[in-house]
Image (tube, rainbow, N blue to C red):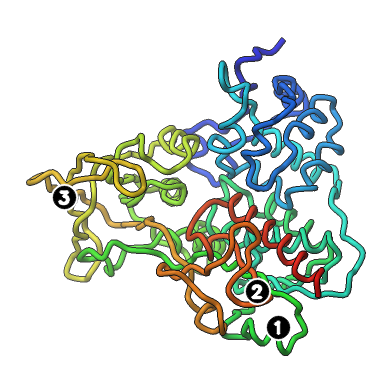
Amino acid sequence: MADMMKRVPVAEQEPKVRAKNFEEVCLGYTEKEAMEEAVRCLNCRNPKCVVGCPVSIQINEFIHEVKEGNFEKAAEVIARSSALPAVCGRVCPQETQCEGVCIRGIKGEPVAIGKLERFVADWAREHGFQAAQAGAPNGKKVAVIGAGPAGLTCAGDLAKLGYDVTIFEAFHEPGGVLQYGIPEFRLPKTKVVGPEIENVKKLGVKILTNVFVGRSITVDELLNEEGFDAVFLGTGAGLPKFMNIPGESANGVFSANEFLTRNNLMKAYLPESDTPMRAGKKVVVVGGGNVAMDAARTALRLGAEVHVVYRRSEEELPARKEEVHHAKEEGIIFDLLQNPIEILVDENDWVTGVKIVKMELGEPDASGRRRPIEIPNSEYVMDCDTVIMSLGTSPNPLISSTTKGLDTDRRGCIIAKEENGETTKTAVYAGGDAVTGAATVILAMGAGKAAAKGIHEFLSKK
């Protein structure tokens, strides 16, 4: 009999082994392990986990089906709410969402909801089971800009309602951050991302790649000349932020966005790559979020000694605890309460080190976290040959600057209603990082889902 207070452990690659390869770290549950973990679910009458899920998966229902061994039914339950379950089961911050409010977690460990979702999605894929089905055609067309989590979710939900949906993607591969941002060892592209996208396409969604909306065609042209009845903007936030410190333009300084895109989408980590990347012998990653962990762990796998420099303490690290734990296991060095003030370069403008000042925490700032304050006369130099800036991203202004009547806020984010994605321009909806700034995959999916509902309500009145 399983210990009801503790979750069934999930197999992982050994840290010393996985630190040298790009294979997936977590190996997932077996059928037996998944059913044992599902038994721990209390099947609450008013399940808080469902409320804690941004896409409102009926978690108690699908876990009940797993417990009974009805994996097809479990997949059907999840498919009613999520177009990307194998992705979400791997990269969602469940600890602050569904698992964070799990009643089982009050006196023990919460049910491993994410690992169970991953199991069900993987089982469905491996058994060729297609849970979701397209709706009867209703004669209306919707354009979706961006094939990331928000766009794929919006497109999938609209297709299930009978809409003729076309996704326009700027890159040569659909998937958005799922393709270019999240490393292979966390989210396999061929095994997981590709099949999830194919499932959306099986609903009748068309995906056109290498179409740069704002240049190749505009939103106004889609509405006025191409016959689309509505447009959803899910263009993400791919414009990296920097610190504006001396030396930041030197050779050997990357944004995490570029570093990860070249490794994930362009396979720069492979020796035979057309665009191989110089990772360096000693890498400094500036930042403490999930993207910083991804960049650090990628650099480690490329053979570098890696330091994460973050200006607050470990308690304030915004990255998922699981990602920080994995990074530490693999040998990433965390230099906390420290902040770069200058990047040092040689006569050829190559990075040689980072000048760092030590910090201490003061009173909470607007974010609610204690504000870091420089300690006088605490500067020192950390030698390195590569610096990766992971300080967040903001939306590219191209869409907003080429679309009449589409308002943005002071950060350049598109202004849209949270409940339905409605923007200031009629028939145009938006969601995900283009609206909120850089956030999580599941929040982008939730926004795509809300916008699909908003578009359906709007077009049902026409």
What SS does tag 3 mark?
strand
Q: Position of residue 285 (x, y in %)?
A: 34, 51
Res 335 seen here: no
Picture quadrant of residue 223 = bottom right
Tag 1 near tag 2, CB within 8 Å: yes
Residue name at image x 66 percent, y 61 percent: 420
Furthest toward the top, the residue is 1
In the displayed structure image, the side of residue 95 where residue 315 appears, left or right: left
Residue name at image x 49 percent, y 66 percent: 238
**Residue that carries the numbered disc 3 in the rendered image:** 381
Q: Quadrant of the C terminus?
A: bottom right
Tag 1 near tag 3, CB within 8 Å: no
Counting other residues with Cα less than 10 Å from the Cα at mark 2, is it few (<14), some (14-19), or many (20 or more)? many
292 above or below 275?
Answer: above
Amino acid residing under circle 2: Val
Mark 1 vs 2, N-terminal side:
1
Mark 3 vs 2, N-terminal side:
3
Label number found at residue 428? 2
Mark 1 vs 3, N-terminal side:
1
In the displayed structure image, the side of residue 158 where residue 183 appears, left or right: left
Amino acid residing under circle 3: Val
Residues at marks 1 and 3, CA–CA distance in whole angstroms: 55 Å
Which sits in the foreground, 390 or 60?
A: 60
Label number found at residue 434? none
What SS does tag 2 mark?
strand
**Residue that carries the numbered disc 1 in the rendered image:** 223
Amino acid residing under circle 1: Leu
Residues at marks 1 and 2, CA–CA distance in whole angstroms: 9 Å
Residues at marks 3 and 2, CA–CA distance in whole angstroms: 50 Å
